[in-house]
Image: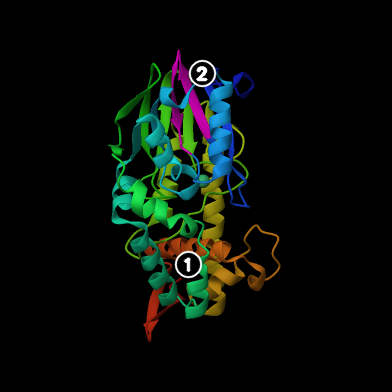
Amino acid sequence: MIFLESEVQVPKWVSRIKVPIPIESLKFVNVYLIQESNAFSLVDAGMYSIRSFHELINRITSIGLRINDLESVVVTHFHVDHITLSPILYELSGADFYLGLKDESALRRGFDRFIGKALRLYKRHGVPQGEANEISRYHPAMRIIDVYDNYLREMPWIPLAERSEVELGNKRFKVIHVPGHTPGQINLFYEEEGVLFTGDHILDRITPQITLMDEREDPLGDYMNSLEKVSMMNARIALPGHGEPIVNPSKRAKELIEHHKQRLNEILEYVKKKGEATAYELAKVVRWRTNYSSWEEYPYPERFFAIGETLSHLRRLELENKIEKRECANIVKWVPLV
Ligand SMILES: [Zn+2]
Protein backbone atom coordinates (compact mmCIF):
# COMPACT_ATOMS: atom_id res chain seq x y z
CA MET A 1 0.00 0.00 0.00
CA ILE A 2 1.28 3.49 -0.84
CA PHE A 3 0.52 6.24 1.67
CA LEU A 4 0.07 9.81 0.52
CA GLU A 5 1.91 12.43 2.57
CA SER A 6 -1.26 14.51 3.04
CA GLU A 7 -2.96 11.59 4.81
CA VAL A 8 -0.31 11.25 7.45
CA GLN A 9 -1.17 11.88 11.07
CA VAL A 10 0.34 10.81 14.36
CA PRO A 11 -1.88 7.92 15.46
CA LYS A 12 -4.30 8.61 18.30
CA TRP A 13 -2.99 5.69 20.35
CA VAL A 14 0.41 7.38 20.80
CA SER A 15 1.21 10.34 23.06
CA ARG A 16 4.52 12.05 22.50
CA ILE A 17 6.14 13.29 25.71
CA LYS A 18 8.89 15.84 25.12
CA VAL A 19 11.19 15.19 28.03
CA PRO A 20 13.77 17.92 28.78
CA ILE A 21 17.37 16.69 28.99
CA PRO A 22 20.56 18.41 30.17
CA ILE A 23 22.24 18.11 26.75
CA GLU A 24 22.32 21.60 25.24
CA SER A 25 22.52 20.56 21.58
CA LEU A 26 19.37 18.41 21.81
CA LYS A 27 17.32 19.89 24.68
CA PHE A 28 14.61 17.18 24.54
CA VAL A 29 14.17 13.48 24.02
CA ASN A 30 10.85 12.04 22.85
CA VAL A 31 9.31 9.35 25.02
CA TYR A 32 6.25 7.75 23.43
CA LEU A 33 3.38 6.52 25.54
CA ILE A 34 1.09 3.82 24.21
CA GLN A 35 -2.08 3.41 26.24
CA GLU A 36 -4.54 0.60 26.49
CA SER A 37 -7.39 1.13 28.98
CA ASN A 38 -5.71 1.57 32.38
CA ALA A 39 -2.27 0.31 31.46
CA PHE A 40 0.46 1.81 29.32
CA SER A 41 3.84 1.17 27.75
CA LEU A 42 6.70 3.45 26.76
CA VAL A 43 9.11 3.60 23.88
CA ASP A 44 12.33 4.95 25.47
CA ALA A 45 12.70 5.93 29.10
CA GLY A 46 14.42 9.34 29.07
CA MET A 47 17.46 10.62 30.90
CA TYR A 48 18.52 10.39 34.51
CA SER A 49 17.79 13.92 35.72
CA ILE A 50 15.21 15.32 38.12
CA ARG A 51 13.69 17.58 35.44
CA SER A 52 13.28 14.68 33.03
CA PHE A 53 11.70 12.51 35.69
CA HIS A 54 9.38 15.28 36.86
CA GLU A 55 8.14 16.10 33.35
CA LEU A 56 7.58 12.44 32.50
CA ILE A 57 5.60 11.75 35.67
CA ASN A 58 3.55 14.95 35.21
CA ARG A 59 2.52 13.96 31.74
CA ILE A 60 1.68 10.39 32.75
CA THR A 61 -0.51 11.75 35.57
CA SER A 62 -2.18 14.34 33.33
CA ILE A 63 -3.27 11.53 30.99
CA GLY A 64 -4.97 9.93 33.99
CA LEU A 65 -2.45 7.13 34.53
CA ARG A 66 -0.17 6.16 37.39
CA ILE A 67 3.42 5.00 37.20
CA ASN A 68 2.51 1.56 38.56
CA ASP A 69 0.24 1.07 35.52
CA LEU A 70 3.42 0.92 33.43
CA GLU A 71 3.64 -2.52 31.81
CA SER A 72 6.53 -2.44 29.33
CA VAL A 73 9.33 -0.16 28.23
CA VAL A 74 11.19 -0.70 24.98
CA VAL A 75 14.46 1.25 24.93
CA THR A 76 15.62 1.87 21.36
CA HIS A 77 19.35 2.06 22.22
CA PHE A 78 21.72 2.42 25.16
CA HIS A 79 22.57 6.11 24.84
CA VAL A 80 22.36 8.28 27.94
CA ASP A 81 19.34 10.35 26.83
CA HIS A 82 17.18 7.28 26.09
CA ILE A 83 18.02 4.72 28.73
CA THR A 84 19.29 6.20 32.02
CA LEU A 85 15.91 6.88 33.61
CA SER A 86 15.11 3.15 33.30
CA PRO A 87 16.30 2.02 36.77
CA ILE A 88 13.99 4.49 38.52
CA LEU A 89 10.99 3.58 36.36
CA TYR A 90 11.77 -0.07 36.98
CA GLU A 91 11.94 0.43 40.76
CA LEU A 92 8.59 2.21 40.75
CA SER A 93 6.68 -0.06 38.39
CA GLY A 94 8.38 -3.45 38.03
CA ALA A 95 7.61 -3.18 34.30
CA ASP A 96 9.26 -5.37 31.65
CA PHE A 97 12.25 -3.65 30.06
CA TYR A 98 13.39 -4.51 26.55
CA LEU A 99 16.58 -3.64 24.64
CA GLY A 100 18.13 -4.76 21.33
CA LEU A 101 20.28 -7.86 21.65
CA LYS A 102 23.67 -6.27 20.90
CA ASP A 103 23.07 -3.16 22.99
CA GLU A 104 22.07 -5.37 25.87
CA SER A 105 25.38 -7.25 25.73
CA ALA A 106 27.35 -3.98 25.34
CA LEU A 107 25.58 -2.65 28.44
CA ARG A 108 26.66 -5.71 30.42
CA ARG A 109 30.31 -5.14 29.46
CA GLY A 110 30.19 -1.81 31.29
CA PHE A 111 30.78 1.81 30.53
CA ASP A 112 34.34 1.94 31.85
CA ARG A 113 35.46 -0.43 29.16
CA PHE A 114 33.68 1.60 26.52
CA ILE A 115 35.30 4.92 27.41
CA GLY A 116 38.76 3.38 27.99
CA LYS A 117 38.62 1.76 24.57
CA ALA A 118 37.53 5.00 22.89
CA LEU A 119 40.36 6.88 24.57
CA ARG A 120 43.03 4.42 23.37
CA LEU A 121 41.57 4.50 19.87
CA TYR A 122 41.57 8.30 19.73
CA LYS A 123 45.17 8.56 20.91
CA ARG A 124 46.23 6.03 18.28
CA HIS A 125 44.58 8.27 15.70
CA GLY A 126 46.50 11.38 16.65
CA VAL A 127 44.51 13.01 19.45
CA PRO A 128 47.02 14.55 21.91
CA GLN A 129 47.00 12.92 25.36
CA GLY A 130 45.75 16.00 27.24
CA GLU A 131 42.92 16.63 24.81
CA ALA A 132 41.90 12.95 24.83
CA ASN A 133 41.64 13.05 28.63
CA GLU A 134 39.50 16.20 28.54
CA ILE A 135 37.28 14.72 25.83
CA SER A 136 36.58 11.59 27.87
CA ARG A 137 36.02 13.61 31.04
CA TYR A 138 33.31 15.68 29.33
CA HIS A 139 31.51 12.83 27.58
CA PRO A 140 27.75 13.24 28.29
CA ALA A 141 27.59 9.81 29.91
CA MET A 142 30.48 10.46 32.31
CA ARG A 143 28.44 12.42 34.84
CA ILE A 144 26.09 9.49 35.27
CA ILE A 145 28.57 6.68 34.87
CA ASP A 146 27.26 5.38 38.18
CA VAL A 147 23.84 4.71 36.64
CA TYR A 148 25.44 2.55 33.95
CA ASP A 149 27.79 0.68 36.22
CA ASN A 150 25.59 0.10 39.25
CA TYR A 151 22.00 0.12 38.09
CA LEU A 152 21.50 -0.41 34.36
CA ARG A 153 23.69 -3.50 34.31
CA GLU A 154 21.72 -5.08 37.13
CA MET A 155 18.30 -4.67 35.53
CA PRO A 156 16.61 -7.79 34.13
CA TRP A 157 16.69 -6.66 30.49
CA ILE A 158 14.79 -8.73 27.98
CA PRO A 159 16.92 -8.76 24.79
CA LEU A 160 15.07 -8.41 21.50
CA ALA A 161 16.39 -10.32 18.50
CA GLU A 162 15.91 -9.33 14.86
CA ARG A 163 12.52 -10.38 13.47
CA SER A 164 11.09 -10.89 16.94
CA GLU A 165 7.89 -9.16 17.97
CA VAL A 166 6.87 -7.29 21.06
CA GLU A 167 3.38 -6.55 22.31
CA LEU A 168 2.65 -3.07 23.66
CA GLY A 169 -0.92 -2.36 24.70
CA ASN A 170 -2.93 -4.56 22.37
CA LYS A 171 -0.64 -4.04 19.40
CA ARG A 172 2.13 -6.24 18.05
CA PHE A 173 5.27 -4.50 16.82
CA LYS A 174 7.97 -5.93 14.64
CA VAL A 175 11.49 -5.48 15.94
CA ILE A 176 13.80 -4.12 13.24
CA HIS A 177 17.54 -4.17 13.91
CA VAL A 178 19.18 -0.98 12.67
CA PRO A 179 22.85 -1.05 13.77
CA GLY A 180 25.00 2.02 13.11
CA HIS A 181 24.28 4.72 15.69
CA THR A 182 24.81 1.98 18.28
CA PRO A 183 25.64 -1.68 17.56
CA GLY A 184 22.21 -2.87 18.64
CA GLN A 185 19.73 -0.09 18.03
CA ILE A 186 16.19 -1.29 17.28
CA ASN A 187 13.18 0.25 15.61
CA LEU A 188 9.60 -0.85 16.23
CA PHE A 189 7.22 -1.19 13.30
CA TYR A 190 3.45 -1.31 13.52
CA GLU A 191 2.87 -2.51 10.01
CA GLU A 192 -0.94 -2.25 9.92
CA GLU A 193 -0.70 1.54 10.10
CA GLY A 194 2.83 2.05 8.75
CA VAL A 195 4.07 3.57 12.02
CA LEU A 196 7.79 3.28 12.76
CA PHE A 197 9.46 4.26 16.04
CA THR A 198 12.96 5.16 14.90
CA GLY A 199 14.90 6.10 18.06
CA ASP A 200 17.97 7.92 16.76
CA HIS A 201 18.22 5.92 13.55
CA ILE A 202 16.34 8.48 11.48
CA LEU A 203 15.96 12.04 12.70
CA ASP A 204 14.64 15.07 10.92
CA ARG A 205 17.01 18.03 10.38
CA ILE A 206 19.93 16.49 12.29
CA THR A 207 22.07 13.56 11.26
CA PRO A 208 22.58 10.89 13.92
CA GLN A 209 26.18 10.47 15.01
CA ILE A 210 28.00 7.44 13.70
CA THR A 211 31.22 6.93 15.60
CA LEU A 212 33.86 4.22 15.45
CA MET A 213 34.65 2.37 18.67
CA ASP A 214 36.58 -0.59 17.30
CA GLU A 215 38.82 -0.59 14.24
CA ARG A 216 37.56 -3.98 13.12
CA GLU A 217 33.98 -2.76 12.91
CA ASP A 218 32.23 -0.77 10.21
CA PRO A 219 29.49 1.30 11.87
CA LEU A 220 29.00 3.58 8.86
CA GLY A 221 28.57 0.61 6.52
CA ASP A 222 26.12 -0.88 9.03
CA TYR A 223 24.29 2.42 9.29
CA MET A 224 23.93 2.86 5.53
CA ASN A 225 22.62 -0.73 5.23
CA SER A 226 20.15 -0.01 8.04
CA LEU A 227 19.01 3.12 6.19
CA GLU A 228 18.48 1.07 3.03
CA LYS A 229 16.45 -1.39 5.04
CA VAL A 230 14.14 1.33 6.38
CA SER A 231 13.90 3.07 3.00
CA MET A 232 12.36 -0.11 1.59
CA MET A 233 9.80 -0.57 4.35
CA ASN A 234 7.19 1.87 3.11
CA ALA A 235 6.54 3.28 6.55
CA ARG A 236 4.00 6.09 6.56
CA ILE A 237 5.31 8.02 9.52
CA ALA A 238 8.41 7.87 11.71
CA LEU A 239 8.31 8.81 15.37
CA PRO A 240 11.93 9.71 16.18
CA GLY A 241 13.84 10.06 19.44
CA HIS A 242 14.36 13.79 18.91
CA GLY A 243 12.41 16.44 17.01
CA GLU A 244 9.14 16.22 15.12
CA PRO A 245 7.46 13.20 13.51
CA ILE A 246 8.77 12.48 10.02
CA VAL A 247 6.41 12.08 7.12
CA ASN A 248 7.85 9.76 4.48
CA PRO A 249 10.71 8.14 6.41
CA SER A 250 11.95 6.43 3.22
CA LYS A 251 12.74 9.79 1.70
CA ARG A 252 14.57 10.91 4.85
CA ALA A 253 16.54 7.64 4.92
CA LYS A 254 17.67 8.27 1.34
CA GLU A 255 18.69 11.84 2.21
CA LEU A 256 20.83 10.51 5.07
CA ILE A 257 22.50 7.98 2.75
CA GLU A 258 23.26 10.83 0.35
CA HIS A 259 24.67 12.96 3.19
CA HIS A 260 27.14 10.23 4.16
CA LYS A 261 28.16 9.61 0.54
CA GLN A 262 29.02 13.29 0.26
CA ARG A 263 30.93 13.23 3.54
CA LEU A 264 32.87 10.15 2.38
CA ASN A 265 33.87 12.07 -0.75
CA GLU A 266 34.77 15.15 1.23
CA ILE A 267 37.05 13.18 3.57
CA LEU A 268 38.62 11.27 0.69
CA GLU A 269 39.42 14.58 -1.00
CA TYR A 270 41.12 15.86 2.17
CA VAL A 271 43.22 12.70 2.43
CA LYS A 272 44.26 13.07 -1.22
CA LYS A 273 45.07 16.74 -0.79
CA LYS A 274 47.16 16.19 2.33
CA GLY A 275 48.86 13.03 1.04
CA GLU A 276 48.81 11.62 4.56
CA ALA A 277 46.90 12.70 7.66
CA THR A 278 45.67 11.44 11.01
CA ALA A 279 41.96 11.20 11.83
CA TYR A 280 42.50 14.00 14.34
CA GLU A 281 43.94 16.32 11.67
CA LEU A 282 41.08 15.46 9.32
CA ALA A 283 38.35 15.95 11.96
CA LYS A 284 39.53 19.54 12.34
CA VAL A 285 39.03 20.41 8.67
CA VAL A 286 35.74 18.64 7.89
CA ARG A 287 32.91 21.13 7.34
CA TRP A 288 30.66 20.04 10.23
CA ARG A 289 27.32 21.77 10.44
CA THR A 290 28.03 23.90 13.51
CA ASN A 291 28.42 27.55 14.39
CA TYR A 292 31.94 27.20 15.75
CA SER A 293 34.54 28.95 13.68
CA SER A 294 37.57 27.01 14.90
CA TRP A 295 38.40 23.67 16.52
CA GLU A 296 39.41 25.44 19.75
CA GLU A 297 35.82 26.70 20.10
CA TYR A 298 34.38 23.16 19.93
CA PRO A 299 33.12 21.95 23.30
CA TYR A 300 34.80 18.66 24.29
CA PRO A 301 31.73 16.43 23.77
CA GLU A 302 31.44 17.78 20.20
CA ARG A 303 35.11 16.95 19.59
CA PHE A 304 34.48 13.39 20.75
CA PHE A 305 31.78 12.99 18.12
CA ALA A 306 33.65 14.85 15.36
CA ILE A 307 36.68 12.55 15.73
CA GLY A 308 34.51 9.42 16.05
CA GLU A 309 32.49 10.40 12.99
CA THR A 310 35.67 11.07 10.97
CA LEU A 311 36.99 7.64 11.99
CA SER A 312 33.80 5.84 10.93
CA HIS A 313 34.10 7.43 7.49
CA LEU A 314 37.83 6.61 7.21
CA ARG A 315 37.11 2.99 8.09
CA ARG A 316 34.45 2.82 5.36
CA LEU A 317 36.86 4.35 2.82
CA GLU A 318 39.45 1.77 3.88
CA LEU A 319 36.98 -1.06 3.22
CA GLU A 320 36.23 0.48 -0.17
CA ASN A 321 39.99 0.30 -0.92
CA LYS A 322 40.26 4.04 -1.38
CA ILE A 323 42.67 4.72 1.50
CA GLU A 324 44.94 2.74 3.79
CA LYS A 325 46.67 3.03 7.15
CA ARG A 326 50.35 3.77 7.70
CA GLU A 327 51.46 3.22 11.24
CA CYS A 328 54.46 5.03 12.66
CA ALA A 329 55.38 5.20 16.37
CA ASN A 330 51.92 3.92 17.31
CA ILE A 331 50.19 6.73 15.43
CA VAL A 332 47.96 5.90 12.47
CA LYS A 333 48.09 8.06 9.34
CA TRP A 334 45.84 7.65 6.35
CA VAL A 335 47.10 7.71 2.77
CA PRO A 336 45.11 7.65 -0.48
CA LEU A 337 45.03 4.60 -2.78
CA VAL A 338 43.08 6.24 -5.59
ZN1 LIG B 1 19.35 10.48 21.39
- The image position of residue 288, as x and y in percent, is 62, 61
- The image position of residue 116, as x and y in percent, is 37, 67
Q: Dot 1 surroundings within 10 Å: few (below 14), some, or many (20 or more)?
A: some
Label ID, residue 13: 2
Q: Secondary structure at mark 2?
A: loop
Q: Is residue 38 magenta?
A: yes
Label ID, residue 167: none
Q: Is residue 212 magenta?
A: no
Which residues fall within the magenta stretch? 31-45
Whether residue 160 is visible:
no
Q: Residue at x 55, y 17 (%)?
A: 12
Foreground residue, 20 or 182?
Answer: 20
Foreground residue, 200 or 237?
Answer: 200
Name the quadrant containing residue 166. top left
Residue type of the residue flagged with mark 1: Ser
Residue type of the residue flagged with mark 2: Trp
- The image position of residue 210, as x and y in percent, is 47, 55
Which residue is identified by label 1?
A: 136
Disc nearer the start of the sequence (2/1) = 2
For disc 2, does the CB lie below 8 Å from ligand 1? no
